[in-house]
Image (cartoon, grey):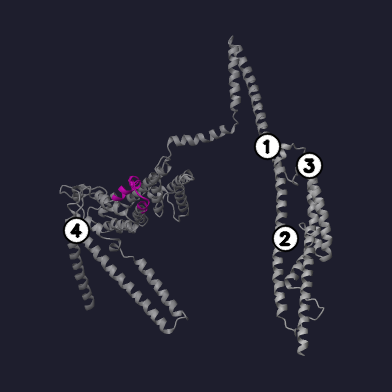
Amino acid sequence: KEKKERRQMEAMVKMSLFNGAIDEVVTRLSAKLEPLLKQMIRAEISPKTYVLFWMLEGYDLEVPVAAYEREVEKIRKAIGAVGESAEMGKTKRAREEERLRALEYKLKEEQSRQTDHVERVRAYLRAEKENLFRQTSNANPSLLHTCVLPRAMFSESDAIYAAKFYLLMHTQRTTCFQTLFITDKIMCDILPVVSLLSENEAQSLGRCLQLILSQHAAWHDDTAAYDRDCKDTPGFNMRLKKTAGGEMKGGFAKHDMHAKLLHKWQNRVSKSLQGSLNNTAADYVHLRNCIVVATKMLPCFPLLATDAESMEKAAGGLRDREKGRRDDLSLKAASYVVLLKTRKMQLRNHAYFGCKEPVQPAAAKAAAAAAPAKAASTKAKPLTASAAAGIKSSSTSAAAKSSGAAASTSTTSVAAAKNGVRKSTKVVNNEEKKEKEREIKKEVAVKAEPSEVEGPSLPPPSTSEEKREKEREREKEKEDKGGERAAKRTPTTSSEGDRSKKRRDADLLGGVAARTLLLANKKPKNELDGVVARESKKDDGRNGSRKAEEKESRREESSSSSQRKRDSRRAETAVEGAGAGDEGGEDGEVPPSPPGVRRDEERASKGGSNGATDDRESRREKEKEERRGKAREERKREELKEKIKERENKEPEK
């Protein structure tokens, strides 16, 4: 008991100290602010209310219990994981657990301090609820325009604070605070406010409206909560009237009246947003802000099934209309439609709010009745414009001719009508013929050109082709001769020679086949110009490939000759460095050829009868072999001379 009494005394002392401190700050700031406020605002709202609203924050009005509990649960899971981990040592595990428990203790202590602070702020507002608003009819509009709406546009946290301050003023039964009037003013006049905002301001305002409308929907769904929070409160006072004593009194709204008001707000917001989204001449900023606000209000709007369908149609129309023009608007509208369809909420009908279903007007009923008759009339095939023109002209000509008697006019008009129909059918037939001719011309124009005809490429039918064929035959004979020579050296080159023969034969066959195809088609020369140019390009490419192969063979010869020279130098140095008692060679022996020469000989033997080899290459190889043989003989002679000299020098010594 003593501990409880001490705690109560400490709480009372803290409360008195807090009230004194906040009174001092508020009075000092209100004294400085009073000359800056307009006289109209000072007459409706006290400077103390203005200062309190802009001085407090969301954490001063409500404790985020869910956030604290979430963080504490994370810390407890981390403690369990540390206790079960086998990687940590015993001392390290103990330190980590101690650190986490200290953090949990700090969070709980901070939560308790936060709850005490919120209780003190609420107690102060509860004590000052009689002095916050003046008993005037414009007090609530002034609060809305100078406090609630401006702060709700700053950021989402400020929007949440504005909604919580609004609900706190209601639940604390603040004198002259009209909850229903402020809500009605916001929901009915939403469009002028939304059209002048930036995107971030629209998001913040949508969040504030969503919190306010969600709370009203919760009061409507739960009658017990409505009786506890709204019954006989100043905020739900419908009509304020001054009595003889100067007091403001009026009747209080019941649950069914509140339901009708909620139905009215839903309809007003729906009509405002639909009118903006369906307006093709609306401004970009206005359309964007309407979509943003509607997206933010999805948890509480629309609650009616009819409003949901109409909003979906309006957003879908905006999505299709702005696609390709302003893709950001189209994307926002498409995302709103998807969120509206996937929203997990039970849609209500008008009877749920105690209202009747809307009756269709007489014009709508007449249009609905005329719809099937119009559909049946549209099924009949109408005459073409040309047929109607023919009928009209024939009837007029018949009427001009039959201006004699009344009976004759009727008969001639019928005949004229028949003749007109015949003429019109003739005109239709002529038009059909013309259309068919146009289609045939298009098909002829779309047909593939000679360059796109499938089959073998067509060579130019000129005398140069005969020369090329003769040159190919000569090259073929040379390749056959070279292939026979190379076949004696290496058996593998025969297959390569066969491949080259096949290629040449295929080219010749392709030329013959192309010529036969040319004679069969009998195409004029001017249509085959592109084919001739392409074939000449192919011949140029073949000649270029031959030149490239010749260049590569020359490079290989130069590299092999340089390698031979290096090897010969190395062999000469090795022979000079060899001593008299060298056992590597005797008189009359021929030293083996160096490794570089051996590689060149192998390359020459593998040269085969390729398409690029000819008599010139064979002559070059023969000359190379003769040079190699001469070089070897000279080396042998020099080595023999040196050995003879060495022996002659050794004999006198012996």
Residue ID for mark 2:
553
Where is the N terminus found, in terms of image quarters? bottom left
Q: CA distance from mark 4 to mark 2?
A: 99 Å
Frontmost residue, 313 versus 559: 559
Looking at the image, residue 504 sits to the left or right of residue 353; the answer is right
Which of labels 1 and 3 is toward the front?
3
The image position of residue 563, as x and y in percent, is 70, 68
Q: CA distance from mark 1 to mark 3?
A: 36 Å
The image position of residue 353, as x and y in percent, is 38, 49
Which of labels 3 and 2 is toward the front?
2
Mark 3 / mark 4, whichever is N-terminal: 4
Q: CA distance from mark 3 to mark 4?
A: 110 Å
Residues drawn in magenta: 182-203
Q: Amino acid at mark 4?
A: Leu
Is the Cβ of the residue at disc 4 closer than 8 Å to that at disc 1? no
Looking at the image, residue 197 sits to the left or right of residue 573; the answer is left
The image position of residue 367, as x and y in percent, is 48, 35
Is residue 1 visible in the rendered image? The answer is no
- The disc placed on residue 29 is 4
Query: SS class of the residue under badge 2?
Result: helix
Q: Is residue 199 magenta?
A: yes
Residue that appears at 22% across and 52% down: 176
Residue ID for mark 1:
443
Mark 4 / mark 1, whichever is N-terminal: 4
The image position of residue 186, as x and y in percent, is 32, 49
Residue ID for mark 3:
463
